[in-house]
Image (spheres, rainbow, N blue to C red):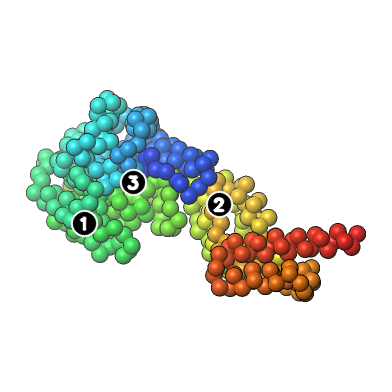
Amino acid sequence: MTHFLHTADWQIGRQYGQFETEDAALLAEARLETVARIAALAAERRVDAVLVAGDVFDTQAVSDRTVRRLFAALSAYAGPWVMIAGNHDAALAESVWSRARRLGCIPANVHAPMAAQVVDLPGAGLAVLAAPLRQRHTHDDVTQVFDLMDSAPGRVRVGLAHGSVAGRLPESADAANPIAPDRAARARLDYLALGDWHGCLAVDARTWYAGTPEPDRFRGNEPGYVLDVRIAGPGAGPEVERVAVGRYRWSAWIETLGVSSDVEALAARLDGLRGDDVLRLDVRGHLNERDWEALRQAVARAAAQARALLADWSGLQLEPDQADLAALGAQGYVAEVAARLQAMQAEGAQPEEAAEALRLLLRYQRELANGSAQ
């Protein structure tokens, strides 16, 4: 029985510019922590090897410190690692990989071939046919060479590659770095371990994308896993188990609001967020000033509970009701300003700014009216 972990798309050094500085730093750190969890999992399960199907690093320009930290994170598992370059960290003549070698920080148990070759692991009964990317984008199928590669008799043949399987991924997927959908059959592979698509996905029984082990996008395509693969011997079908290792849960909510009960229901959902949640909230519809304020308070509470919360208010309009209009007074310059701000919202001319200005105007007039009545 040959037993290994398949993982990919660690993207170490990734930046999260859309988030606040503190949140961005913790999300980036989580990627290294997840690699350490993978190493611990490999040791715990006593696997024969760990295969990493490209994009170990997010860019060629990651710092030397980050390169050193990545390889240090592997220390819990002393068995063989086989990792290849992907499109983000392609094996160029001068690359993050050549720099890592100069730094002398690649452990002896880490195999990182810079050209297509067979990495033979006799102790595991495993031959890894590796096809690192040597440039960011290519229109040639780099796995075609697998068809001609020989391996030692009795070895389980596993391909390791990074790219897009033609016709098997959503249309939004990158069409560069194509991989034939029947490559496993053509090359007599017992398993084809792929990277590039960030969700966990079975192309067929012998061909899998592991996905990124630490979620990093709001796509909801099942990231956050490594694959535990067992193959009884050459020609046997793989037994594949998805193992959750991700730290943060990324979610995207689109909410259409119109009445107080909508706000109350959303507030209840937001109250359920915890420190491992990363949420993008897109709110649409129309609310009066009191419901708008209640929503803002609910979002503020949730932002304090979650790891990160991005709120998009641009689709939400502030629509004064009779109580709001009474607080404004139905005449004069203030009423004209309020009408203009409402028109700006409806016309889509800086709707978010117009709604906020209208909200502040309503609040000021309400507080003014309350003060006069006392």
> Which residue appears at 26% of the width and 47% of the height?
87
Q: Nearer the viewer, residue 189 or 335?
A: 335
- Helix, strand or loop under label 1: strand
Q: Position of residue 26 (x, y in %)?
A: 49, 40
In the displayed structure image, the side of residue 64 where residue 23 appears, left or right: right
Quick check: can you spot residue 339? Answer: yes
**Dots 3, 1 in contact, CB < 8 A:** no
Q: Which mark is residue 178?
A: 1
Q: Which residue is mark 3?
A: 9
| Image quarter (top left, top right, bottom left or bottom right) of the N terminus | top left
Q: Along the polypeptide, which appears first: circle 2 or circle 3?
A: 3
Q: Please name which of the two marks, 2 or 3, marks the residue nearer to the observer.
A: 2
The residues tagged by marks 2 and 1 sit, at their Cα atoms, a distance apart of: 36 Å
Q: Position of residue 310 (x, y in %)?
A: 54, 54
**Dots 2, 3 in contact, CB < 8 A:** no
Residue kind at label 2, given as amino acid type: Leu
Dividing the picture into quarters, in which one does residue 263 lie? bottom right
The residues tagged by marks 3 and 1 sit, at their Cα atoms, a distance apart of: 17 Å
Q: Please name which of the two marks, 2 or 1, marks the residue nearer to the observer.
A: 2
Residue kind at label 1, given as amino acid type: Pro
Quick check: can you spot residue 324? Answer: no
> Which residue appears at 64% of the width and 68% of the height?
341
260 w.r.t. 227: above or below: below
> Which residue appears at 35% of the width and 36% of the height?
62
Q: Position of residue 353 (x, y in %)?
A: 59, 61
Q: Along the polypeptide, which appears first: circle 3 or circle 1?
A: 3
Q: Nearer the viewer, residue 18 or 239?
A: 18
Q: Which mark is residue 309?
A: 2
- Helix, strand or loop under label 3: loop
